[in-house]
Amino acid sequence: MRFLLIHTAGAEGSVALADEAVVATEVLPGRSSSEQLVPAVRRLMDTSGWTLGDLTAIAVVHGPGSFTGVRVGLSAAKGLSEASGVPLIVVSRLALVAAAAGDGEVVHAVLDAGRGEFYYGQYAGQRCVREALLSGDEVGAAVVGGMVVVCEAKVVEALIDLNPLLVTEPSAGDVLPFAVERARAGEFDDTALVDAKYLRRTDAEIFAKPKMKSPAR
């Protein structure tokens, strides 16, 4: 099996080619993903002597994370998939963070979402229990047992009372185990239906007003 792996949802983007292991990779510094992603893919393919037709699947991290990065990575992956007929696999960034903790039974992966909110994912082994956009207090209430895993120093500081484990920010190469498992099971995503994973709050949550307490009598 051969895969093109794309991850542009984090602070720094990357792309990789892999079969049983990663055979080539390139980092996209800073916020350069929009300009550098497709040329980087072309360079890796040319250097490795691979063509799109050689691929088993194209796997991409579809969020949550940088809105621009998520859109750029997913759009490129969908475009390449549709143009070549190569199947598409999408992977959650939270799943990558959770996987970095090892094989713990319950893992709570947390990412910074800005404005005092967090992207939160609860995983049991490799199975996603739920993912949501939560406040700090909501994260604290959600963490019952298991390990809290983060990849950003600012999240460690914000959630220090939860004793989070700081791991390295996942890269495109870390998508490989997910891509292999999904490809072996024949579980691919429909390019016409798959969308970015932004984990926004619903309008009902945004505009909900706290209930007024009844005056004491």
Image (cartoon, helix red, strand yellow):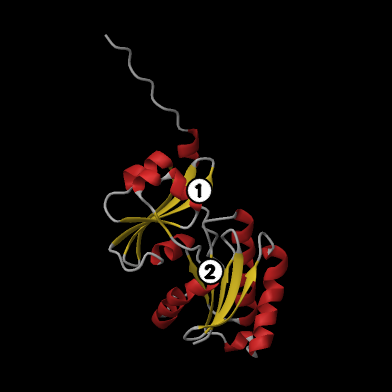
Residue drawn at (66%, 60%), measured in percent from left and top?
30
Work out whether mark 2 precedes mark 1 in sequence or the reverse, and give the earlier one: 1
Neighbourhood count class around disc 2 (C-alpha, 10 Å): few under 14, some 14–19, many 20 upward: many
Any part of residue 199 in sight? no
User: Distance of mark 2 from mark 1, alpha carbons?
Assistant: 19 Å
Look at discs 2 and 1 and give the one toward the viewer. 1
In terms of secondary structure, where does tag 2 sit?
loop
Q: Where residue 93 sits: x, y (%)?
A: 48, 62
Q: Where residue 209 sits: x, y (%)?
A: 45, 28
Image disc number at residue 56: none
Q: Amino acid at mark 1?
A: Lys
Q: Where residue 28 sits: x, y (%)?
A: 65, 67
Neighbourhood count class around disc 1 (C-alpha, 10 Å): few under 14, some 14–19, many 20 upward: few
Looking at the image, residue 112 lies above or below residue 136: below
In terms of secondary structure, where does tag 1 sit?
helix
Q: Amino acid at mark 2?
A: Ser
Reading the image, the residue beneath label 2 is 171
